[in-house]
Amino acid sequence: MIFHSEYCQEHTYRKNGKEIVNPIQKMVIGGHVVCPRCELEKEHQALTNEVQAYYDGFQSQKIYNIFLNKSIITDQTILNASFENYETSIQEERQNKSTCIEIAERLKSGQVFNPFLQGIQGTGKSHLAYSILKRINDAKLNKSCLFINVEDMMRKIKDSFSNRQSKYTERYFVDLLSSVDFLALDDVGAETGAIDTDKTASDFVQRILYAITSTRQDKATILTTNLSSEVLFKLYDKKLVSRLLKNPKYVLFKETKDKRLASIPF
């Protein structure tokens, strides 16, 4: 251990200019004159930075995995959905695909609005809604995404009434759907079985949707539905529909036909 005649300026004077009682004398280490305290502090900071980087990476991956692990999807083919494999054959499909790509970019940039995809079943609304979230999630912005089929969510909540082991309680879904940055509520209205009828949503359904939407006024929520605005207002409380339609960007499927029926050979 070889001490040098110099003292470390960093550890000799306090910020107010007063001398430190026990100043740190520099040392010769590896042919270099260094302050041993400064070297220890550098090593400590490097270790701190390494631990922080690991933690940040872990947290980032945790947020990324919310979309993959916590989404509730009835049609498992949706898991392979992307803008790249959304097939188009008419101008409306091409325009709607282009609009949804634009929506994804706007949401990524921080804009807040509610994309609303409406049209008959089988037109690819769920495919495009999932693709929007996938594009955002793959950008790894440390923003959480979640895709929820509303009918399946309601079924899981009802099942939890008689199954105390189930985690899928009303509180679980309200907390989860309220917390994520980007949410897709898929097939709104189907959970009531109200298509082509005059029935209204139950208080149970409306309570849950109201609780979720009330906490998402400053967050983007994507909605898909087969129902017209007239049916939605019959089905749900007006205040709830107003929240669902707040600051909307409409993507309408008026000419696109049911892709599933189009493949039937008879």
Image: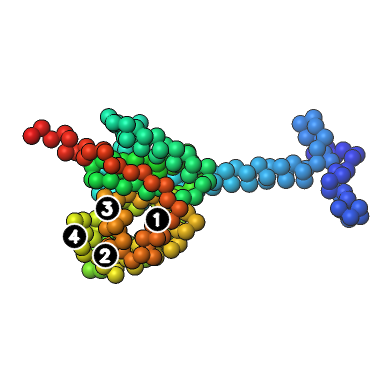
Instruction: Answer left or right for 183 relative to 159.
Output: right
What residue type is disc 4 on?
Thr
Read off the residue under disc 1: 245
Counting residues from the start of the chain, the first of labels 4 and 1 encountered is 4
For the residue carrying disc 3, how many other residues have a C-alpha within 10 Å: few (<14), some (14-19), or many (20+)?
many
Q: Residue at x 31, y 61 (%)?
A: 233
Q: Position of residue 40 (x, y in %)?
A: 72, 44
Residue pointed to by mark 3: 227
Q: In the rendered structure, are the residues bearing label 1 and label 2 in contact, judged by CB atoms less than 8 Å apart?
A: no
Q: Which residue is mark 4?
A: 197
**Can the viewer see residue 100?**
yes
Kindly identify which residue carries mark 2: 201
- Circle 3: residue type: Leu
Using the image, determine if residue 154 lies above or below residue 122: below
Q: Amino acid at mark 2?
A: Ala
Q: Secondary structure at mark 3?
A: loop
Callout 1 secondary element? loop
Give the secondary structure at mark 4.
loop
